[in-house]
Image (tube, rainbow, N blue to C red):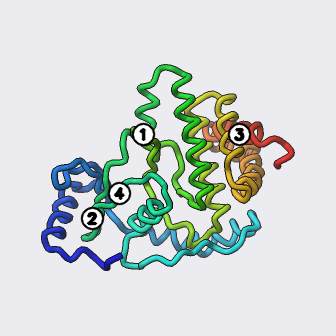
Amino acid sequence: MSAAPASAELSAALLAASEHLGARRAGAIDWQGQVAFAKRTGRQRSRDRWLATLAAPLVRLFWRSGPATAPRRAGDVPIEVQRLRELAAAGVRVPQVLAWGEGIFVMTSAGTPLEHVLAATPDPRERLQLLRDTAVELAQLHQRGQWHGGAQCRNLAVTPEGLVRFDFDLDLDRYFALPVLQAFDALLWASSVVGLTDADAATALVRTYLDAAPEAARAAFARSRWLVDRLAASWLLRVWMPKEAHRVQGIAAVLDGAAGPEDG
């Protein structure tokens, strides 16, 4: 990975892309005659401090996990650019990085957002198959020893070649072990699935993921069920955020139904 684009022409094109975005953090642009997607770079340092000082030690204690994955990455290359390259090298379908620099990077379009495809699919059997594809694809991602960090269905796109993942601006592997990251993926994905189908179908979809997921990810996911169950039973959540409490209770029921008591 080079330190930065050396071409003055390329830098000018990236600056033009940044101007095109205006106040937006990300959006579609025209890049050298093709539709592409541009995104501003930069770390959320307050989040990093919170993770390093509080969240990471608590998570490691609760999940009884090992040390952080902590890969070596070039500090001058944006995190999302590095992660996209790493995932592509591992065989994961992700957008291709076209250029980066000047506080921005450009990548190919991911495809049609999955949520848009689901909204335009009236046949419940076809919708369910699309969601089943997400379960299988997430398990395959984890079987490759990878993780997303934003595994909700809203961060998936549909292409003729299959599902494509996007939005990788978190470097959580600086703080957490791989099974914890994969359990976090599974929780985010499951919570999004619960909002897209009925409880019975969501339970079957989570079971589909668990049947194909790596053993370490399943074990970490089983521990996360305890946390979701406690949150679902919280009277504070029911009083202060009744709608959110109802949603969490629905997620907890789906997770418990999918895993079964023997896996708790």
Say what amino acid the circle numbered 2 marks: Ala
User: In screen coordinates, is 29 left or right of 222?
Assistant: left
**First reached walking from the N terminus: tag 2 or tag 3:** 2
Residue 262, position in %: x, y?
Answer: 86, 45
Q: How many marks?
A: 4
**First reached walking from the N terminus: tag 1 or tag 4:** 4
Q: CA distance from mark 3 to mark 1?
A: 22 Å
Residue picked out by circle 4: 96
Q: Closest to the observer: 243 or 183? A: 183
Q: CA distance from mark 2 to mark 1?
A: 23 Å
Residue picked out by circle 2: 99
On-image quarter of the N terminus = bottom left
**Residue at point 74%, 39% (across, down):** 258
Residue picked out by circle 3: 207
Say what amino acid the circle numbered 4 marks: Gln
* Above or below 134: residue 77: below
Residue picked out by circle 1: 158
